[in-house]
Image (spheres, rainbow, N blue to C red):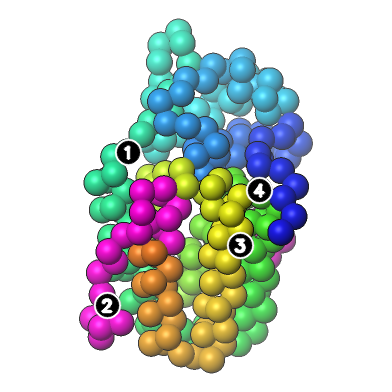
């Protein structure tokens, strides 16, 4: 495994500076690159991103609405924390929703969409291999939501998206350094294989294990006891 870098915070050059800063900061918070409890100032973040202070302040206000940061008057922005119980509950809800929905939509995914999903899954692997934690989080999030979108239920997609935004994955860096993160990332390629094979049961089981076991490792608290299913069981241009 070749680790190129462990931070995704670079000067911003995209058109929508506010949106770019919001996305980059959100992913850095979720990945644990920005640690819970730490306070960041607008000027400090602006210098870090290579932009002016105004879009940074706007981005932080957006993230405050999502509950990811707390505005400290005349001080800056504190990264909010969530408890071990909160994290377990978030993962528990996800594991009850995502595997079941994925199994329901597997036959609705057009064959011509499989290469796009495979490219998204490969992007997750590539970001993990490169050590780009925040970009890894973004790629992982887009893949899972892409599967859910085939349900045609936008409220469900939004719900899972919010659950993911509230999660903190502080165990990512140790997993990256040990090589486990790449192995976990490759599970998404297996999921695409199951989609291509129209294996609903296999996909449901794979997602149940992935969310239950991997979420526990990523949180850095040990594996979750994932609930059983009822039957017992775009960052890279994609």
Please say whether residue 65 is visible from this viewpoint.
no
Count neighbours of disc 2 (C-alpha within 10 A) and say few if under 14, some if 14 to 19, many if 20 or more: some
**Residue lying at the far top of the rendered structure:** 74
Q: How far apart are the two marked residues, 2 and 4, measured between alpha carbons?
A: 33 Å
- Tag 4 near tag 3, CB within 8 Å: no
Q: Find residue 84 and report its horizontal and vertical position in percent.
A: 29, 44
* Magenta stretch, overall SS: loop
Earlier residue among tags 4 and 3: 4
Q: How many numbered discs sit on the rendered protein?
A: 4
The relative height of residue 219 versus residue 69 in the rendered view (above or below) is below
Count neighbours of disc 3 (C-alpha within 10 A) and say few if under 14, some if 14 to 19, many if 20 or more: many
Earlier residue among tags 1 and 4: 1
Judge from the rendering whether residue 40 lies leftward or rightward of residue 11; answer left or right: left
| Residue that appears at 64% across and 75% down | 118
| Residue that appears at 66% across and 50% down | 131
**Residue under label 3:** 182
Write the start and end of the magenta stretch as one range.
214-238
Earlier residue among tags 2 and 3: 3
- Judged from the image, the secondary structure of the residue bearing numbered disc 1 is loop
Please say whether residue 118 is visible from this viewpoint.
yes
Q: Find residue 213 and report its horizontal and vertical position in percent.
A: 39, 64
- Judged from the image, the secondary structure of the residue bearing numbered disc 4 is loop
Residue 229 is marked as 2
């Amino acid at each position: 495994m070749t680790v190129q870098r462990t931070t995704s915070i670079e000067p911003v050059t995209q058109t929508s500076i506010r949106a770019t800063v919001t996305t980059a900061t959100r992913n850095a918070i979720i990945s644990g690159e920005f640690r819970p409890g730490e306070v960041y100032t607008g000027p400090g973040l602006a210098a870090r991103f290579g932009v002016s202070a105004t879009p940074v302040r706007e981005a932080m206000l957006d993230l405050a609405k999502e509950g990811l940061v707390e505005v400290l008057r005349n001080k800056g922005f504190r990264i909010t924390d969530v408890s071990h119980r909160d994290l377990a509950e978030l993962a528990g809800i996800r594991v009850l929703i995502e595997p079941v929905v994925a199994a329901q939509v597997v036959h609705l995914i057009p064959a011509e969409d499989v290469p796009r999903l495979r490219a998204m899954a490969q992007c997750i692997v590539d970001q993990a291999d490169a050590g780009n934690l925040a970009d890894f989080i973004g790629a992982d999030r887009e893949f899972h939501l892409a599967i859910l979108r085939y349900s045609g239920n936008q409220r469900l997609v939004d719900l899972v998206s919010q659950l993911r935004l509230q999660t903190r994955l502080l165990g990512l860096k140790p997993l990256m350094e040990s090589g486990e993160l790449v192995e976990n990332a490759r599970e998404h390629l297996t999921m695409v294989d199951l989609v291509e094979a129209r294996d609903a049961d296999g996909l449901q089981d794979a997602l149940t294990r992935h969310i239950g076991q991997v979420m526990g490792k990523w949180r850095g608290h040990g594996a979750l006891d994932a609930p059983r299913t009822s039957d017992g069981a775009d960052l890279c241009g994609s």
